[in-house]
Amino acid sequence: MRGMDDAARRYARGLDAGFNRLAEALRTVEDRIRFDRSLPALHARWKELRGDVARLRSLVEERFGTLSLYRDVAGDPGMPPSDRAAEEPARASPDDLLAANLARAREAARSIEESLRAALPELSGQAERLRYAVYAAEAVAAGLIRRAHRLQGARLYVLLTECLATMPWFDAARAALRGGAQALQLREKDLPAGEFLRRARLLRELTAEHGALLIVNDRVEVAALAGADGVHLGQEDLPAYEARKLLGPDALIGVSTHAPEQARRAESDGADYIGVGPIYATRTKEHRAAAGLGYIAAAAAATELPGFAIGGVNRETLPAVIAAGARRAAVCTGIIGARDIEEAARWCRARLVEA
């Protein structure tokens, strides 16, 4: 500490305070996501950010020495009076606590970056990347927390493609919903845009009557125009974060994944759920090899976003899919191709609920 001028000491003291605020905020967010929200995938992301903060602090301390040695708690003009705690309002809810610490993390990251630009400019680039990582994690966390409850109890997700159904498309949709489908995806690859929109609007009314979600496959503009709950995207479609710009913060966005790295990318792009598969070869994914039952566990290890096992799931295969770890399934011909669509949906949902 000797040999440092007063300006350097002030920067060191400010950096110590900034790093402490950031680490404390990140830990609070991490714990609240873990214990209040039970979103382990997000918990891991905030834990990684804490590691990034610790590494940057170590680099700073290689230049300044141990930052805590510059701390002057008694002489800090920002130190609250001893009776201040009694005046602090209690957080109204876990969400308030979470929001306050998300803001605190964002502000502390900016403070650290600005201090390093002046004191150690060679580290300012790393500080800037850390700040943007905090911003990105905040956006994903805030969005998932805002939307996660809508998928919480959804187990059975039915894909509607008329050419694969045993009855007209609207009747098939109604039967699937009567049987307990909690989400319905309009999946018609070859319909003209006008007819696709007409069907989406009709299904919006029908799913609303049943308290079910309506998801539109691929066509973000139709999802917006029809007032759908969200959109499902393939690997060749828009990234989730681009679709979010068009659909807004309340839309549910799903992404098809076929490998663990795609599942991780879907999470970082701000998806709300993933399709896991195809588990078996299927008529709706004839161009893609089956990912196999092993991908169910691999996807769960890569991200804990809700994952719907998809591809060849039906009455015969669902028990094996559940045994492999799936607790949600997206079913197409296994339900809409059945002779009794309502009964097939009811059977599939019962097996998933039992699991």
Image (cartoon, rainbow, N blue to C red):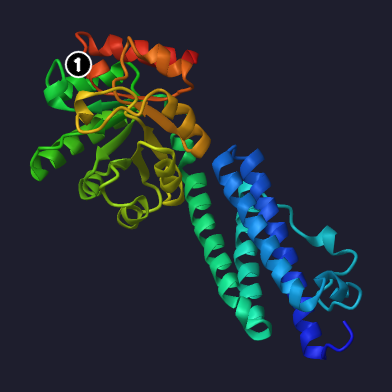
Disc 1 marks which residue?
337
Q: Is residue 277 visible?
A: yes
Query: Image quarter for residue 147?
Result: top left
Vertically, is 160 above or below 256?
above
Say what secondary structure mark 1 lies in.
Answer: loop
Observer-nearest residue: 6 or 278?
278
Split into 4 quadrants, where in the image is the N terminus? bottom right
Observer-nearest residue: 150 or 22?
22
Image x and y of residue 165, in percent: 16, 19
Q: Amino acid at mark 1?
A: Gly
Observer-nearest residue: 271 or 295?
295
Image x and y of residue 297, in percent: 48, 28
Image x and y of residue 253, in percent: 36, 44
Vertically, is 119 above or below 31?
below
At 60% from the left and 55% from the top, the residue drawn is 99
Q: Is residue 334 left or right of residue 322?
A: left
Q: Is residue 340 left or right of residue 255?
A: left
Image x and y of residue 75, in percent: 89, 78
Number of numbered tags placed on the structure image: 1
